[in-house]
Image: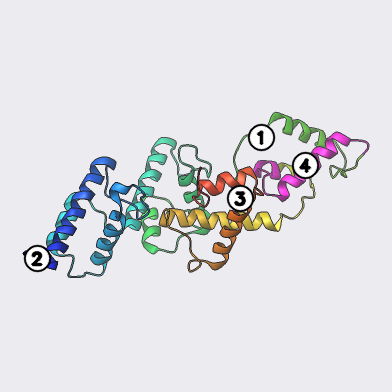
Amino acid sequence: MTRTPNNYRVVDDWLDKLALLEDYKKEFGDCNVSQNNKNPKYKGLGKWLNDQRFNYKKKRKILTKERIELLEDLGVVWDMDVYKFDQKILELLEYKKTHGNFEVPSNYKPNKNFGNYIYRIRTKGLKEDWKIKKLQDIGFFEIGTRTKKEKEGHVTQNWYNNLEKLKKLSNPNLPKDSKEYPKLAKWLHNQKRTFRYGRLKDEQIKELKKLNVKLPAKSKKRKKWEEYIEIIELFREEYGDKKITSEFDKELYEWINQQRANYKHKSLRLEKVEKLKELNILQTE
């Protein structure tokens, strides 16, 4: 029986993976297969592709000129960070073409993740100079200049009606147990609670502050929740569905495990469950 030399088997395996990648492209339209792809047909393909990118970046001889050409002819993107950011640039340009500006709201309905991404650029800025330059080249200069999120959404007419009643009072800071205006006092108390837990819209906060209404300090738990959610959203934009490990951020890793435990014991609010599922922290059933 004649044995096939090991190097031939390696070549055959590489070509088999290339053919599998071609099948993936025919099915999905690109070669950007994730390492977390769970389709058994493409098992191991994401890791193999990542290895090719690593070899390309390190200029390893195992990735020959011929292999590079085969991968490039198929449409393989070598640097996914550059590719994904260029996609964001195209989305920004398309938004400006439609709306005449770059004012993408954080709750942008066609693509909320895109809205959140642009919001983070405005508030947190960017570390990479090449990303900053690409944004400036298209006329986007608001990088790390905003300090507060503009929460948008529908404020009911009933809310404004109560606000008008409050405006007519000489002292709008009604105590919770006011006997003269019990319904309005209860409403105001609920606004303060809503603010404390981070669910009052900026427009509402602005109107209450105009009346010098004393708003309470935000809940430390809510503040911590919002901070961690923003970090996770940024992580997802940069690394996709890759697992968040203790090596990335120990405190965040422990916090995520606590949220999963809370979910298991059914002690998480529905809005939090939905958000964590959206970010792939909790598995969608």
Residue that carries the numbered disc 3 in the rendered image: 263
Gap between marks 2 and 4, in whole Å? Answer: 78 Å
Rendered location of residue 51, percent (x, y): 27, 63
Judge by depth and name the residue closer to the eye, 275 or 10: 10
Q: Which residue is mark 1?
A: 155
Of mark 3 and mark 4, the one earlier in the sequence is 4
Mark 3: amino acid:
Tyr
Mark 2 / mark 1, whichever is N-terminal: 2
Point 85% across, 39% down: residue: 185
- Secondary structure of residue under mark 2: loop
10 to 264, vertically: above or below: below
Which residue does the numbered mark 2 point to in the structure image?
Answer: 3
Q: Which residues are magenta?
A: 179-206
Q: Is residue 242 left or right of residue 213?
A: left
Comes first in the chain, label 3 or label 1: 1
Real-space Cα distance between discs 2 and 1? 75 Å
What kind of element bears circle 3?
helix
**Discs 2, 1 touching: Cβ within 8 Å:** no
Asked whether residue 145 appears in the rendered view, the answer is no
**Residue 101: quarter of image:** top left
Identify the element where label 1 is drawn: loop
Q: Secondary structure at mark 4?
A: helix
Q: Which mark is residue 190?
A: 4
Q: Nearer the viewer, mark 2 or mark 3?
A: 2
Pick the front one: 54 or 109: 54
